[in-house]
Amino acid sequence: MNLNQLRYFECVGRLENYTQAARELHVSQPSLTNAIHKLEDELDLTLFAKQGRHIVLTRTGSQLLQVVQKSLQILDDGVATIQADTATRPVTIRVGCIPTVIGTYLPKVLHQFEQAHTKQISFELHSVPTEKIQTGLAAKQYDLGIAATDSREAGVLYQPLLKQAFIVVVSPDHPLAGREQLELSDLAGYDVLTYTPELLIGQKVRRTLKRQGVIDRLTVKADYPDEISIAGMVQSSLAVGLVADTLYLEAFNLVKIPVNVPEDLRVIYAMYRADNPQHDTLRQLFQLFKSAAD
């Protein structure tokens, strides 16, 4: 049994999927499968069972996964702490950030922090969707996440950064373009373009429409991955877009109209795991985020 086998087992056990684990670990699926089978032979334990076309952890596998995860965490944290104490190069904070924030709000704050910690701190930015940020934090691919979320995970610290309002966008010659504010019911009779329910923001839109009692009265086309694709369709048609107010919309010839709903569509948070080896640095960064928000 070696360290690679334990890391492979942790990834397969956490995902319960060989294909996804192979992709995350950057190894071939046959190599990963062979490593797991060899581990089972060496330990004389059955760690996984087939359930239809899928695999699931056995009870023994679940028990071993907890032991392995704790052990790897102690090892990784210990190595990271030693490296941080002895490193002569700046500490690099890996940041996973949603695209609508990575080119606007975030760089200003991070640059200010870097200037206050000259030659000590640097940031590595990754533009990724919310879902990948959350899994990336759990897998320790990112030290800091910047994303919208409606829920809180145990062991993760959160700091609200900014809010993006719920708005309607229409073309300048649209019948609704002159309105100062809209009710969701005003959108009846038009194609309403919004985010796919595969995204968290798409799920938020759907929940809001249900709570407001209008989902069955509107013609909703929830097929779009972002504001750019929605805005592109809206500016040359009579469709309306139901979106978050982001800078992506500034590139289009559209009219933005506030919509009367009792909540913002998206609240953006900074988040990091409390057990991150760079906890002290991230805590200081959170103070700067808080000051900027105030």
Image: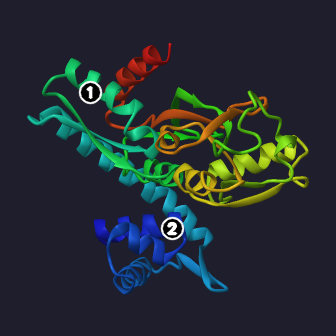
Q: Residue furthest left?
A: 88
Closest to the observer, 292 or 134: 292
Q: Position of residue 239 (x, y in %)?
A: 71, 54
Q: Name the residue rendered at 71%, 38% in the picture.
A: 177
Give the secondary structure at mark 1: helix
Residue 147 in sight from this viewpoint: yes
Residue 144 in sight from this viewpoint: no
Q: Mark 2 sits on what residue?
A: 13
Give the secondary structure at mark 2: helix
Q: Position of residue 243 (x, y in %)?
A: 64, 44
Graded by Cα atoms within 10 Å as few (under 14), some (14 to 19) or many (20 or more), the crowding at tag 2 reads many
Closest to the observer, 69 or 52: 52
Point out the tag, 2 or 1, that comes first from the N-terminus: 2
Q: Name the residue rendered at 15%, 23% in the picture.
A: 118
Q: Name the residue rendered at 55%, 77% in the picture.
A: 48
Amino acid type for the residue under numbered disc 1? His
Q: Quadrant of the N terminus?
A: bottom left
Q: CA distance from mark 2 to mark 1?
A: 39 Å
Q: Mark 1 sits on what residue?
A: 111
Amino acid type for the residue under numbered disc 2? Gly
Asked if residue 264 lies left or right of residue 282, the reply is right
Q: Quadrant of residue 41?
A: bottom left
